[in-house]
Image: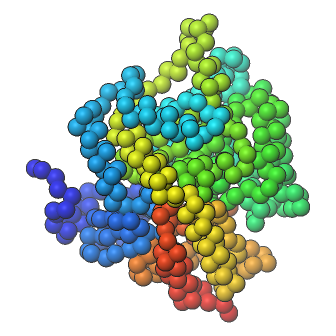
Amino acid sequence: MTYNANEFDAKEVVGNDRNHVWHHITQHKPFEENDPMVIVKGEGMRVWDAKGNEYLDAVSGAVWTVNVGYGRTEIADAVRDQLVTMNYFAQTAGNVPAAQFAEKLIDKMPGMSRVYYSNSGSEANEKAFKIVRQIAEKKYGGKKHKVLFRERDYHGTTITALSATGQYERKNQYGPFTPGFVEVPHCCEYRAQDDADTENYGVWAADQIEKVILAEGADTVGALCLEPITAGGGVIEPPQGYWDRVQEICKKYDILLHIDEVVCGLGRTGKWFGYQHYGVKPDMVTMAKGVASGYAAISCTVTTEEVFNMFKDPEDARMDYFRDISTFGGCTAGPAAALVNMEIIENENLLDNVVEQGEYLRGRLNQLMEKYDVIGDVRGKGLFAGFELVKDRVTKEPVDETLPIQIGAHCMQNGVIIGRTNRSFKEYNNTVCLSPALIATQADIDKIVDAIDNALAELAPNA
Ligand code: PMP
């Protein structure tokens, strides 16, 4: 059989999917009555399903991934050329696109130096955790091995990445977890903790991290892992003062700062990386989704030269290099796609577009908030936005979890795909998320927000 992406029997494909594919993070019971959605084509910001329905995708492949949009033949061509020239050799040796992309990437990340390739965000984070543990072994007799993570942040699906995740709804039922991962309080100003200093919330929230460090013992804490803007946990940007204090704390206790850019990386927030908005100087940065916009699997764990150098020390034979391998990491379709992906972001000035359209998007969402009391808070940066749904703006009681699902279904019926968080703050499913491709135009944003407006008019009009 020769596979051809354009020749298939749609009915047969949907049947095969229904009978044999286990969809991700999806309840399958409804498929006994309704066909599963099978996406067969993408072009720019739009996708089509097997039944011929067209959708404007406001979440870049459901999970904020397709940063440069669908149907980029220039990426596909580069990947094809690469595969017929050299498809695979392990990263025990170098290859052309991996070397070229590493250089280009480091150029965008002043202060960073080395790229370790793998295949997914979870895996990239696992590499960072292993780096922390090996440094702990090497320098601190194994003691300084703990990793702190923040409530509401997500770092991945494997058991250890999940152990480092602060979302109850994702962790529930999957324990026991890997030891050595410790949660610090969230930094969501809208949901400020009862005892918080709301005047200086950013600094207060960072100070809570210090309290955890002191309770655990600073000599046991090796790293602090944070999303620059919490993504799936509700699109939460820490307010002013947070990052300066976080950096002070890391420095004071000799703790590595690991920034998870799996969602924010590669332009989503209007800079190459989310941390670059806040003057943060990380020791490690992980990234995945937007690195190749979903044209091939690739993730990176990027470190400073200082971190890398700890693995060159010949004095301890056990620890003289990083004893890790990822069979498919960095080989070769991923970095080839990533090179062209980055070139597109540069050549089409997409970072500027993200800033401009991001402001427009947030402006329109703020207008919706004036119109509908059910919107309690509008958040985000660049083409990355979320709004939280509440029953009452004063009490901030979350809406029932069916409402965001209904809003999503209503938008879908009107040809727009939006996203939502699973649950927030241990209660309800209450943040609607938007992350359109970085190529979004004002007309695209209007169509997205109009679809939400229509949904809210029907499902949550003011009393
Ligand atoms: N970190 C963050 C911030 C994420 O949002 C995700 C995925 N949603 C991951 C890590 C894990 O990435 P992956 O699904 O590629 O393993």
Quadrant of res 370: bottom right
Q: Residue furthest left?
A: 1
- Coloration of the structure image: rainbow
Residue 108: horizontal and vertical position, in percent?
57, 42
**Quarter of the image that includes the C terminus:** bottom right
Evaluate whether residue 164 shows in this view: no
Q: Residue 214, relative to residue 5: is it above or below?
A: above
Residue drawn at point x = 44 percent, y = 75 percent: 416
Residue 91: horizontal and vertical position, in percent?
40, 26
Residue drawn at point x = 45 percent, y = 71 percent: 417
Evaluate whether residue 364 shows in this view: yes
> Which residue occupies the foreground of this view, 59 or 273?
273
Q: Residue 203, relative to residue 449: is it above or below?
A: above
Is residue 60 toward the left or the right of residue 90 in the image?
right
> Which residue occupies the foreground of this view, 430 or 224?
224
Residue 234: horizontal and vertical position, in percent?
63, 62
Residue drawn at point x = 81 percent, y = 59 percent: 193
Residue 313: horizontal and vertical position, in percent?
61, 12
Quadrant of res 52: bottom left
Residue drawn at point x = 54 percent, y = 89 percent: 458
Q: How many marks?
A: 0
Q: Residue furthest bottom?
A: 463
> Which residue occupies the foreground of this view, 226 or 272?
272
Q: Residue 181, relative to residue 267: is it above or below?
A: above
Is residue 462 toward the left or the right of residue 347 in the image?
right
